[in-house]
Image (spheres, grey):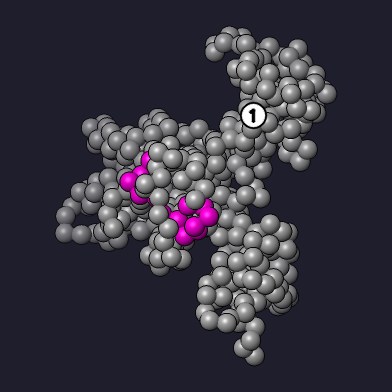
Amino acid sequence: MAGDRLLIAASPGELRLARLHGGMLVAYTLERPSRPSRVGALCHARVTALAPALAGAFLAITPEETAFLPAEEAEPERRDGAPVRPIGTLVHAGQAIAVRISRDAMGGKGARASARIPRDDREAAARLQPPALVTPGPDAIARALAEPPEAIVTDDPDLAHSLRSRFPALAGRISVARAPLFDEWLEAEIESLLAPEVPLPRGGRLRIALTPVAATIDVDTGPAGGGSARAEREAANRAAVVEAARQVALRSLSGRIVLDLAGLPGGRGQRAGLLEAARKAFAAWVPDSSVLGFSRLGLLEIVRPRIYPPLAELIGAPAEGVVVSPLTHALAAFRAALRVASAAGAVPRLVAAPAVIAAARAERAALSACAARLGRPLELVEEPGLSIADWRVEDSRVR
């Protein structure tokens, strides 16, 4: 089906949202209720420590979560461009302060907060004893529906009912499909977002790596075609900037992004043409990004505000590719268990490495939801000899 569709696949412990336009995957995200995004949340926080060397302070925003408050965001009435006072003159340890979360925790760093919020928000926060979450930020569904698609399809009738209540203006666009909602093609597209290499037309490829400093995207051309080497590089680079922009959007890459084009020409006119192509591509796919231009080393530099963690970090550990976490494997196993249970009379059992079983047991709400849908608890069996990726769900009746 062509058009603009948002598919929302619900499974125990996880929502997966895929947006398709004309049959192409144009956006993907996932949300885990046990680890919600805090961006946009209003909190009545408690200052736990000052960090003058970092020009900020550390906060407890809930009893279990922390955030960093930069000095430039610690003075509620400060205007943009006004001088920033030392953090010790703005807050003190033990102080209660109302903040909104402006960036999720990522890359080993905590969430970021701002006290530059309306007076009404500060008054609402003051009604709760700190540290406390006053109001959550928008969830993944609300963010996806900020630009409503033509159709919204989910595999969960209860979720569909909830969405019709939350978004009455969109109720007529919401429908329920039989599981599995994501077909083999879409699952393969999503899996490819974790791979370090992305194929390009004419045999070229992108190589994507995440480092603490920047996300790097290297462009390799394919075998020479019938044209000149210069024309081949030009075509490869133009295809590369479009696909790089798409990958940045789909993988939720942010911060510093460096694109190393293939055999970058030295002529100003040719560089200007590639720069314009990159700006158009990133404006279309990643509107909040800025294409800065070419560095002295010939690298195309892009910057995008850090707000949400990259997809690779949600799934596991970013690296050359992604090391998938035991939690991600456990949640995938819950989905597999429901598929096995759809066979008449099947009684699913998860057999997995101890780390995956431990992750499954830690997700108590998801495990309970899985049991409710199965009509019985999911049997969990540890097998120490397995790697975390080699779990299996089997019918326990079959010996």
Task: Give the tally of numbered discs.
Answer: 1
Report x, y in % for residue 59: 74, 29
Bounds of the magenta span?
148-160
**Viewer-proximal residue among 338 and 93:** 338
Report x, y in % for residue 142: 49, 40
Residue 104 in magenta stretch: no
Q: Residue at x 66, y 50 (%)?
A: 34
Residue 153 in magenta stretch: yes
Q: Is residue 61 left or right of residue 229?
A: right
Q: Is residue 95 left or right of residue 195?
A: right
In which quarter of the view is residue 371 placed?
bottom right
Q: In this view, does 197 lie to the left or right of 11?
A: left
Q: How crowded is mark 1: few (under 14 residues within 10 Å), some or many (20 or more)?
A: many
Report x, y in % for residue 311: 52, 50
Report x, y in % for residue 15: 54, 53
**Viewer-proximal residue among 23 and 302:** 23
Q: Identify the image quadrant of the C terminus.
A: bottom right
Residue type for callout 1: Leu
- Can residue 65 be seen here? yes
Q: Residue at x 30, y 61 (%)?
A: 203
* 183 lies above or below 210: below
Provide the residue designation for mark 1: 42
Q: Identify the image quadrant of the N terminus.
A: bottom left
**Viewer-proximal residue among 205 and 103:** 103
Judged from the image, the secondary structure of the residue bearing numbered disc 1 is: strand
Query: Residue pushed farthest left?
Result: 226
In which quarter of the view is residue 62 placed?
top right
